[in-house]
Image (cartoon, coloured by chain):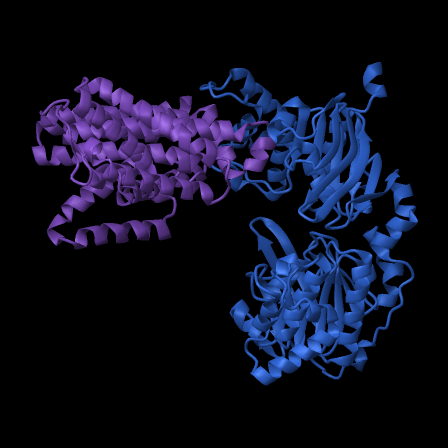
Chain colours: A blue, B purple
Amino acid sequence: MDQRLSNRPVLEVRGLTKRFGGLTAVKNLGFEVNSGEIFGLIGPNGSGKSTAMKSVMGIERPTAGEVVFEGENVAGLPAHKIARKGFGMVFQHSRPLNRQTVLENIMVALLPDSLFMLFPDKALVERAKWIADRVGLGAVMNRRPPTLPFADLRRLELAKAIARDPKVVLVDEPFAGLTRAEVDVFSDLIRSFRDEGRAVMLVDHNVKSVAALVDRVLAMYLGEEIVTGKADDVMKNETVRRVYLGGAIETHARPETSFKDKVPLLQVENVSVFYGKAQALENVSIHVHEGEFVSVVGLNGAGKTTLFNTISGFLPYTGEIVRGGDKLRGRSPAKIARSGLVQCPESRELFGEMSVRENLDLGGQHLADEKRAAQLAWLFELFPILKERQGQMAQTLSGGEQQMLAIGRALMMQPQILILDEPTLGLAPVILEQLSKALEKLRQTTSITVLLGEQNVTFALPHADRVYVLEHARIVWEGDPGRFAAEAGADFL
Amino acid sequence: MSTFFTSRLFFVSLALVIIAATLPLYVSGYVLGLLTVAFYFGVFAMAWDLLFGFAGEVNFGPTFLIGVGAYTAGILNNQFGWSVYLCILLGALASVIAGLVLALPALRVRGPYFGLTTLVAVLMLQNFIVVFADLTGGEIGLTIPDVITINAGANYWIALGFMTISAAILYGLSQSPIGLVLQASGQDPVQAGALGFNIVKHKLAAFVVSAFFSGLSGALLVFYFGTASVGTVVDVAVGVNVIVSAVLGGRRTVLGAALGAIFLIVAGEFLRPTGELATFIVSAVALLVVLFFPGGFLGAALSREARS
């Protein structure tokens, strides 16, 4: 490698900041990536890592900061200009051209940005074939994308990203939806990009899944850098451990035998769900007793939301879901919710332009006036801040208040079973504490059965009576929260 | 591209055009007149499909482009008596300019707003025509002194030739590298940008091409009718017919759009004995196709071929 290149990082990011309205998604982020290096940008969901990557690529326009590529500041240029300078990006979700062959799809990436190219160059075809072979699509290059397995579609994304021989390759969640064996193959491919002298930057949720692949890692949380270094050192870092695992966790689990119902209130039996070709749930079985607090922990993409949406009746599935002896198959989501199985979704789904009070009233719409007033009074005791904010438009609330409102609206439906999907998403630690107290109160003073999905283990364990670990669409561990750290915790760094 | 000339689609199209070209030898002037209009509509629909099917932009106002072309050509002929061919050419150019003026700001807005902008443009044009009745003939319509020819057979051949050439150009464009980039931008603009394509530039080009063919076809149509009126080339209902034709024939096929237009007009005429019901029946068929075969006539056929 030539001297100049080895001295100067090909990509230098300084003071990168991205704000969306009042929310600062990325705060003063700085790092550099060298040629022939794999650099990981790691953080829990909502930490701003994807926004940071999009800001580098120009898909989002940075609010402030510099993105210096080979000595030139490219921050603020549109994506297509940045791409032409020598960047390629591998997207997590692929939407290939379905009427064109794999080869033609790769050729699209090779075309010039010109309105006068009416006939493709023969040289482009040769180059496209070479790239197809390079990523392992040689055997299928004349097939059309709808006939390909999921892993090959991901290969096609890799092929498009490296088509024009970029110096910097950005990869968004390289292993999402892949099997273990495929992960190894893709790791080798990404390593080969590095060995060709490219700078590779990848974004993922946890250090462990990419530890074997990356040379250096930057761990971030709430838009800011926590620490940068070798994967092993980052995993040992105290702050990183606290963000992912929490410190010493006090648990208050009630033994499963203490619940009186012999047949659990909710039983999910051998449920499998597919999104097109990708399997989102594989023979998942869980059960929840009446009054029990069960946490399903798993990293982003493990299948938690899919599991909850399946229970709520939004997705087709194989297997059975039984509640109190009745099979739920065939019931509409509205009917399931009305009957007392209420989900508070990850995306909150508040009615943003309605007031806090109106949102709550909608949740309690089926109640008689008196009962609704009583339920509301109880709710305001649980979340006092909502009482103060009654007249305010929901979309003007802070993230934490919005989450409380979302939970509050679900509680207004007087659920028998409450499903909470990632309530801590993107919230600051101080808010987590408030939410945590409310959940504890809920557990101690009501008989509501709670099913909580979380990647934030610190939040999921203290209240749980029982814990399931969901990984790559499968349940891989079940047990007492007290045993979690010793038996399953290592995967969550 | 080269595979097209050996594909079944090419031979079927060629056969259809040859058969169509012989029609004046044995069918009545009435049928020829009907098909003449249908062919011009076919070009409207194909031009629209280039925008919707490939660039992914729903233009709710195809008649804005058509109307500007038609009325510009008609007014120039009416006011100044310029030659028919010059008027047609200027009509097409006016349509391109109007299209640019509309698309430049409209393509910067996202989502459904582009479509809404184009819809508003039609209403404005319609209003303009009614208000400036001295110039445009207003609601009664604009009389156009010249025609290309009064021979029904010749008019038919002109329309068929024009549609065939337009189809070749538009289809060729859709299969060229530009068409691929357009499709990619329509399907996933973020990714197309990250692959290094200036999406606004490509969509604008598609809009210009679409405007040119719409305007040209609109201008030719008024010189065939000998009159231009809001009801035939500007009204929103006409635009809806163009859209339905394209969707019926098959999104992203270009050629299917022409088939859809011909079907729509011919079927409407065949059902004329049913009176008011005709429009209803044709609309119902269109609705059923859209609901159950969203790929349209040609889309369904092509995707079957693609799977095999």
The number of callouts visible is 0
Residue A89, image quadrant:
top right
Query: Residue A189 in the image: x percent, y percent?
Result: 72, 32
Q: Position of residue A202 (x, y in %)?
A: 74, 37
Residue B188 higher or lower than A453, as above or below = above
Seen in the image, is B182 located left or right of residue A431?
left
Q: Residue at x 73, y 56 (%)?
A: A425
The x and y percentages for residue B214 are 31, 30
Front residue of this view, candidates B221 and B252:
B221
Q: Residue at x 18, y 51 (%)?
A: B278
Q: Quadrant of the N terminus of chain A?
A: top right
Q: Tell me: A378 left or right of B185.
A: right
- Residue A38 in the image: state x and y as whole percent: 79, 32
Closer to the camera in the image, B144 or A403: B144
| In the depicted structure, whether residue A487 falls above or below residue B65 | below
Left or right: A435 in relation to B18: right
Q: Residue at x 58, y 48 (%)?
A: A277
The answer, for residue A174, to whether it is visible in the render is no
Question: Which of the 4 quarters of the picture holds residue A398?
Answer: bottom right
Q: Is residue A424 visible?
A: yes
When asked about the image quadrant of residue A446, the answer is bottom right
Q: Is residue A460 above or below residue A52?
A: below
